[in-house]
């Protein structure tokens, strides 16, 4: 088992700047601002008495430790400007950002808040998040073992999660509502072999791909699995956040595809009382989520229910779970966009509805899945179609690369 997270410190931030900072897991305290299903792909104003919850793989990752913090220390990074404008135009109240490198000093988070989100981008209103939590992650964390069988033990593929340094491809939760820090559960140290009937890779019918040392070491989560509760008016909503490994970049043993399946399965088990007793968090607490609790599963899950290279049973089980909001998962409220519907990509050959796609390569891989007891008003994917306002934020048509190959996905939930 790995080291337990230190008690998160508070980072208090306002428009005047950063006041206080320390610790490994990061928290901030905040201010506020404020969506029938919208015209797909349009920027939609949120209605009163609703909370907008979103996920966005922002691709704010860098090749070297500290590089993202340096890039965000001023207000001149073109990628960060576009990412910030997308956030300012969609205005989520709660946002999970994936592929946001972790740094223990919190420089990247504070720089993004101060120099980008708190500054108007192309006339969009600034947006403030006073509550922020960034967990430590498994990417780049060494195992000391040859996990990919290439004869070395120090490559990015030999880490608990693929990464060139510890914290690469991390994630962060930004919220306008208080985060209940004392109740956060993390599952960074949970071993893959602790999951009953885990889909562990095999070289052949009788030979495991991983040796005994690897099986006793390798963690399930390629980044982290986090259960963080936010307090929204009278409601407590659990954010179940993760970013499973892509189901590719492996060999015939399909180790990444199998792990992706089980990383997604973890949440299906976590919200099922009869299947969650094997789960143990990083503080030693056993079990999953009580039946009366409200939740939202969100993140880049790297799995499409119809197309792509993943083992689809994992995501299908989650989408079809009786505790997951049916219409948002598979019905009339599935987040969609005109940009996805009209994209010139693999969408022309895929079986699924391209309007539901959340990635530029034509798959639905990013999810905001509320629990069945929550009242969902509307949803969407920020993906303007060709010729629409703000199209340049996703197309790279200004001569620069698109800021991310993923799209922001949002869901509006009524809070009475």
Image (tube, helix red, strand yellow):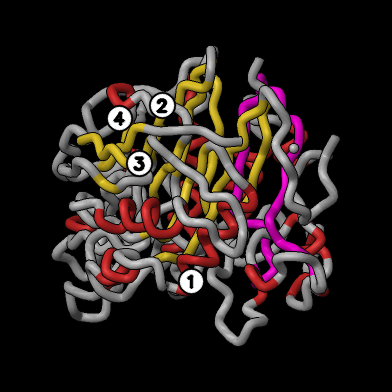
Residue that numbered label 4 is attached to: 280
Image quadrant assignment for residue 361:
bottom right
Magenta stretch, residue numbers: 360-385
Question: Which SS class for mark 3?
Answer: strand
In the rendered view, tell whether residue 133 sits above or below residue 415: below
Q: Farthest front residue? A: 16
Task: Answer with left or right where residue 349 lies relative to residue 27.
Answer: right
Image location of residue 190, percent across then percent down: 29, 41
Q: Farthest bottom residue? A: 399
Residue that numbered label 1 is attached to: 79
Residue that numbered label 3 is attached to: 14
Badge 3 or badge 1: first in the primary sequence:
3
Rounded to the nearest whole Å, what is the CA distance between mark 3 and mark 1?
Answer: 23 Å
In the rendered view, tell whether residue 317 sits above or below residue 403: above
Q: Is residue 92 visible?
A: yes
Is residue 227 or residue 149 the one in the foreground?
227
């Amino acid at each position: 088992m790995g080291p337990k997270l230190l008690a998160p410190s508070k980072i208090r931030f306002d428009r005047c700047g950063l006041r206080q900072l320390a610790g490994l897991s990061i928290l901030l305290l905040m201010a506020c601002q404020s969506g029938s299903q919208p015209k797909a792909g349009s920027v939609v104003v949120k209605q009163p008495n609703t909370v907008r919850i979103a996920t966005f793989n922002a691709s704010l990752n860098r090749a070297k430790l500290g590089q993202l913090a340096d890039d965000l220390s001023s207000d001149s990074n073109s990628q960060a400007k576009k990412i910030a404008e997308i956030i300012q135009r969609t205005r989520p109240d709660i946002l999970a950002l994936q592929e946001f490198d972790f740094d223990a000093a919190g420089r990247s988070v504070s720089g993004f808040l101060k120099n980008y989100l708190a500054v108007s981008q192309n006339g969009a209103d600034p947006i403030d998040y006073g509550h922020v939590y960034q967990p430590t992650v498994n990417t780049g964390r060494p195992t000391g073992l040859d996990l990919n069988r290439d004869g070395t033990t120090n490559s990015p593929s030999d880490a608990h999660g693929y990464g060139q340094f510890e914290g690469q491809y991390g994630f962060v939760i930004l919220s306008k509502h208080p985060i209940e820090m004392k109740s956060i559960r993390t599952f960074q140290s949970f071993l893959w072999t602790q999951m009953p009937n885990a889909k562990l890779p095999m070289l052949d019918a009788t030979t495991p791909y991983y040796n005994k040392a690897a099986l006793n070491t390798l963690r399930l989560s390629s980044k982290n699995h986090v259960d963080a509760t936010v307090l929204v008016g009278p409601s407590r909503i659990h954010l179940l956040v993760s970013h499973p490994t892509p189901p590719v970049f492996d060999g015939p043993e399909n180790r990444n595809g199998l792990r992706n399946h089980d990383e997604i399965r973890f949440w299906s088990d976590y919200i099922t009382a009869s299947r969650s007793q094997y789960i143990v968090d990083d503080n030693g607490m056993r079990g999953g989520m009580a039946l009366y609790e409200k939740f939202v599963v969100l993140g880049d899950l790297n799995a499409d229910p119809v197309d792509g290279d993943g083992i689809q049973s994992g995501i299908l089980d989650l989408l079809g779970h009786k505790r997951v909001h049916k219409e948002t998962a598979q019905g009339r409220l599935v987040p969609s966009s005109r940009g996805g519907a009209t994209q010139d990509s693999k969408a022309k050959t895929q079986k699924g509805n391209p309007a539901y796609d959340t990635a530029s390569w034509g798959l639905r891989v990013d999810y905001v899945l509320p629990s069945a007891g929550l009242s969902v008003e509307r949803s969407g994917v920020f993906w303007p179609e060709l010729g629409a306002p703000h199209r340049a934020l996703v197309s790279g048509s200004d001569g620069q690369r698109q800021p991310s190959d993923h799209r922001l996905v949002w869901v509006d939930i009524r809070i009475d």
